[in-house]
Amino acid sequence: MAFTERDGYSGGRYDLGAQKTDTELLCHFQGNPVRYGHADDPLSGATADHEITVTKRTMHSNQLHINGIAAQALVAEFGSPLYVYDAECIRQRFHQFHSAFPYLNLDVHYACKANSNLAILRLLREEGACIDAVSTGEVFMALEAGYPAHAILFTGNNVTDEEMHFLLEHRILINIDSVSQLKRYGQMAPDTDVALRINPNVGAGHHDHCITGGPDSKFGISHESLDEVHNILTQYQLRVTGVHAHVGSGFLDVAPFLEATETLLTVAGDFKALQFVDFGGGFGIPYAPAEVPLDINTLGQRLTDRFTEFCKAYGKRLRLKLEPGRYIVGESGVLLMRCNAVKSNGDRIFVGTDSGFHHLIRHPLYNAHHEIVNADNIQDQVFVYDVCGNICENADFFARNRSISYIREGDVLAVKDVGAYGFCMSSNYNARPRPAEVLIDYGRARLIRVRETVEDLLRGQREF
């Protein structure tokens, strides 16, 4: 049977089917590594020996514009704080990633935990993405966004029987995470297809919290358990149609990923009815000027060559699955927030904003770096600031000791590269509503999530 890049499998119960200035920064993905901006451009955050990828941003009259729309105008229309995403950047990132892996039978499963807004899910569906889901809630949203069940792969952790019943009812292929789950699955659905998540005994990520492989990880089936796995498969007549591994989130070095690849392929050879091998996600982006972008083209070619070699030995051309999330949407997003207060404490200058870690928790949780620009005063004398939020915690900072153009009360600040693990990790801590989300596409800003109100904080509560 002939396959195309978006064809599905031919058989199997759960088979997958298928005005501008010289400071303009354009999401333009050709060649590798991907680098843009000008070293002397205050918009780019770039230095003379490193340039970073960003969504399309321009400067007019000393103000930041996002795809031709002034940040100040966006805040005036939709309020502050505000998440803003660039649709074209998402599309280009998706196709740049896809083309980096020149394997014919490739499925790119967008890891929707990175950003699960329905508008973004639908956008990526139209581009040919499949879905990597980690909860029944994500499965539900993917179905609502129009993905067929066969385009969704579920990889949960500590999964309940109720969740597995939901997945079976909706004909979603389950990636089994543990021996216990496999046994329970076999009891409720014998003589069906399953996939297995293998712990590759190697992990990588931008923070310890994000490493999902290795002996200290709670994820996946260990090598020591594989004999028991085979016994359970035989007992319940389960067919393993796919194997999977995931080293962690946000890696920029390809070595751990390639090491895990060898481990997974060794395990894969023991299963004779495979239809796919899923090498997971975790593909990182550079957040700080000193970080070097992931060489995705080299990685893609090396993985393609190795997998082609494996399939030849296996005797069957399998599908190759990958699960990018951050890599697709991370650089598309900006968080706009307004400066409410500027105050000094000794030699420190604190910039207080109308947002906080309840909207973007990445700095307190991961010590993550996000470039911040003054969207209302891009080119001016630079001062060193601590940029903080309005939450009653001293961990509530977006950045410390950060050089930013002179900030005045009322200025709009832009936190860059927040398209992934931003809004989706937000909360109502301190009884504060969450912000609106806007998607800019073809020069038009469209509201894709309404701003919460204080009344929304009562939703679901009942009188005692």
Image: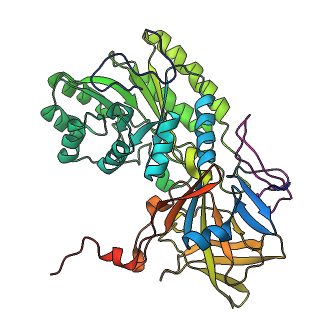
Q: Is residue 362 above or below residue 2?
A: below
Quadrant of the drawing holding the N terminus = top left
Part of the protein shown in magenta: 24-51
Q: Where is residue 43 in the image (x, y as percent from the top left)?
A: 77, 61
Q: Position of residue 50 (x, y in %)?
A: 79, 50
Quadrant of the drawing holding the C terminus = bottom left
Q: In this view, does 164 lie to the left or right of 304?
A: left
Which quadrant of the structure image shows residue 372? bottom right
**Residue 398 appearing in the image:** no
Q: Where is residue 256 in the image (x, y as percent from the top left)?
A: 56, 38
Report the predominant secondary structure element of the magenta stretch: loop
451, 209: nearer the viewer: 451
- Residue placed at 23% from the left, 35% from the top? 182
402, 13: nearer the viewer: 13
Q: Is 34 part of what is drawn in magenta?
A: yes
- Residue placed at 63% from the left, 46% from the top? 89
- Residue placed at 41% from the left, 80% from the top? 430
Q: In this view, does 192 lie to the left or right of 124?
A: left
Which quadrant of the structure image shows residue 373? bottom right
**Residue 384 appearing in the image:** yes
